[in-house]
Amino acid sequence: MTNTIHPVALFRLSVLGPLTSRDYLGHGELKAMLAQLATQPYNIPGTRRRFLSEKTIEAWYYEWKRDGVDALTPKPRKDRGSCKLNTHLQAIILQAKRDNPSRSLDELIRLLEVEGIVSIGQLKRSTVHRLLKRYGLSKPAATDGQPIERRSYEARTAGDIWYGDVMHGPKVTINNQLRKTYLVSLMDDASRLICHSAFCPGETALDIEHVLKQALLKRGLPKRLVIDNGAAYRAASLQGICARLNIRLIYCRPYEPEGKGKLERWHRVVRQQFVTELHSGHLQNLDTLNQALWAWVDRVYHLREHSVLATTPLKRWQQDIEKMRSLGPFAHQIDALFYHRHLRKVRKDGTVSMGGQLFEVDYLLAGRKVQLVVDPQTQTVVGVESPEGDSLGLATLLDKLGNCHRQRQRATEDKQTDDNNTAQMFNAIDTLITNKPL
């Protein structure tokens, strides 16, 4: 009887398809084909990742050449089922997890380090995870140990709730290097309309703020913004923007992608209907990739009837236009709302440092703490403020050569003192000359 081939082995064989179909590869062909395969998205079993490295595909290829499809079957860990921790320490970790099932790996390790049971850095997260998984304690649990109640819901009107999340995108050429992109998206809950979406070189707070700014300009102000719990979303700059615009910022629970199920569905649609249709011309750079994305969103996604809505996302959005919050008084200051502020202390020579450069401010601010106001998109300093937010003028790039010929300013009292000292000196000279004997 023929043995069943492992599903993972079949997947790896499908990835190697263009290589396994060739009886002979010329000089340089293997490297070129590996690079091409690494740019394609895959539905990788057991993970949310969508791309494979050239090194991984190459290793699979040589394993297949050596032992055939059986060599592509994943190998179990040699230490599977074993644990290097002593029995007493294992019992302490398991009991700490059972006492509070919501404790994360980092919290468990920190607890043992604080109690002096282990030294700092002794326990590895992977070791603790394998131990918990072995005893069925690795999955996050509700605070009370009971399953979390989930219910399907929908906002009453468009603009009530927006969702934000990031998806790993295809690789494009950035600064002459092939780099992975990240799709940052904001979706309206009631209409499933994409307020704005863009492929970015990273998933930092700056990338997220850039997409949010474009979404606000195009679609107005949401009442609530539901986003991930990552560090980029918890940036003080993003929180400040939402606070000034009166947008309630809501963070999803960690490890619970179900809280953004509509966006997860959007990501699946993007992979299946957009990413799979990309060709080399779309992947030349970020601009060409985003142009293709925006054309597809406006001409296909927004105009295609949604099964749940029984209409298109655009038509559903248009039904509630009069009920939405517009930018209104914030429209003329939208750029300023997205400026970043960095606290600095002015040096004695009236300069402050920022990004490895020195900027001159009013010399009267020497010794005081000020905020440099920076446009994060262009990384230019646009002004100076007090820590309370009051404008203190401009900041100009330090020009040392120009300062050689610039007239210095002095305080009024210093000038008066100098004048008095000069007058006294001349009076003393006149007295000496007058009293000198003939």
Image (tube, rainbow, N blue to C red):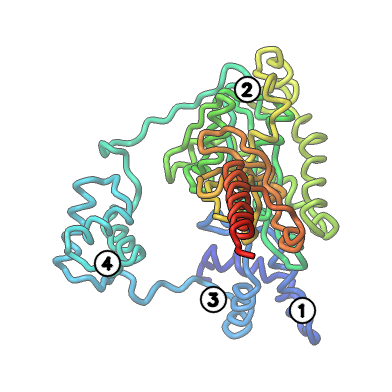
Q: Which residue is mark 1?
A: 22
Estimate the x, y position of residue 123 in percent, counting from the top left: 29, 67
Q: How dense is the environment of label 1, judged by Cα within 10 Å: few (below 14), some, or many (20 and up)?
A: few
Residue 151 against residue 420 in the figure, above or below: above
Task: Determine which of the numbered discs, if any, sits on residue 296 in the image.
Answer: none
Which residue does the numbered mark 2 point to in the structure image?
Answer: 159
Marks 3 and 4, the one that precedes in the sequence: 3
**Is 420 positioned to the left or the right of 124 in the image?**
right
Which of the two labelled residues, at mark 1 and mark 3, occupies the earlier sequence position? 1
Q: What is the distance, in whole Å, between disc 3 and disc 4 at their CAs?
A: 43 Å
Q: CA distance from mark 3 to mark 2?
A: 53 Å
Q: Residue at x 25, y 73 (%)?
A: 84
| Relative to 119, 183 lies left or right | right
Label 1 SS: loop
Q: CA distance from mark 1 to mark 3?
A: 19 Å
- Crowd band around label 2 with a 10 angstrom C-alpha radius: few (<14), some (14–19), many (20+): many
